[in-house]
Structures are given as C-alpha cells and as structure tokens.
Amino acid sequence: MIKNFLACVCLMVGFVANGYCQGWYSNNSNSGKQIQSSVTASLTIQNRSSYALTVKIMRTGGRGLYQTLTIAPNSSGYVSFSKSDSFYTKTKASKGLETLYKKSGSFSIQCDERGYSQATLQFYVSSGNGGSGQSISKSEFDSNK
C-alpha cells in the first residue's frame, strides 16, 4: 500500500513539473499571435589592412543604404540584422593621399524561423586598383542608392 502511494506521489510530481515547464516556455495568453524572436543575424567586418575603411552596407535592388561603418586600420566593425535580406558593400579605403573605392558582389543574410546568419567579411587592401570587387567612382560611393 505504501509502495502504491509513493508511486502515485511520484507520478503526480512528474505531471506537475511537466505542466510547470510547459507554462514557463509557452505564452498561452498570446496563442494564435506571432511572437517575434529577439535573435538577430550579425555581420563582422574585419579590416586587415593599414587603410582606414568606410563601409556602406547597401540593400540590393536599388533599395538604398542600410548602415555605414567606419573601421580603423587592423580593426573590426559589427552590423546586426533583424530580418532576411540581400546586400552588397561599397567601400572607401583611405591612407595618406590615396583613396580607393570598390563595390562588392551581393550576399544574403538569413534571420527567420529557419535560422540566422553569423558572417564575417575580411578586407585586405593594397595600393592601386587591383584586388577583388569592382572599382567605382567617388560619386557612386557617395550615392546612397
């Protein structure tokens, strides 16, 4: 009889703990409503050069500027994103009297119910017009379109 009583108490404790955990992790007052996640995607931009960088994160399709970062030589910058989208960069690299302007290819950031991006771009800048990316004019860099 005592064994049966202890077995019942253990089962009841198991059900109570299970109910408590479900209530803790779910928000029953918002059932049927979409709950926005606090998780964000991120992009770290590393400047692996002796040039000062100004990096513009641009939305693809002519949708304009997302964010501008100024990154000192041999330093990093950080950008966060709250939803999925496609972007490209416009970069100004300055050192002394020399200034170089480049435009990158597009990249995608994912930030949704399937997951989120944690990406890194590394910039290596050397003198002249070599390197990766398309050379652009100062006026194209200055444009936020």
Image (cartoon, rainbow, N blue to C red):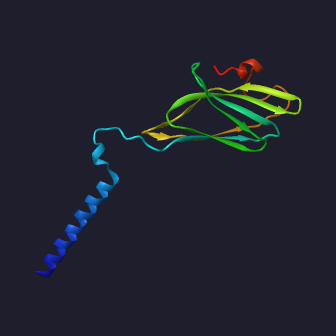
Question: Is residue 34 found left or right of 77 in the rendered image?
Answer: left
**Res 133 → quadrant:** top right
Rendered view: 54 above or below 77: above
> Residue 9: where, in percent of width, then height?
19, 72
Query: Residue 39 at x, y = what percent?
Result: 48, 44
- Residue nearest the viewer, comparing 4 with 20: 20
Q: Quadrant of residue 32?
A: top left
75 displayed left or right of 67 = right
Number of marks: 0
Residue at the (20%, 68%) spot, across then down: 11
What residue is rendered at 77% in x and 44% in y? 74
Residue 61, given in percent of the width and then of the height, sits at: 57, 19
**Image spot of residue 36 (x, y percent):** 41, 40
Residue 24 found in image quarter? bottom left
Q: Residue at x 51, y 37 (%)?
A: 82
Farthest residue, direction right: 97
Extreme-front residue of the structure: 29
Q: Is residue 61 above or below residue 84?
A: above
Quadrant containing the C terminus in the rendered view: top right
**Residue at x 32% of width, y 50% of height:** 26
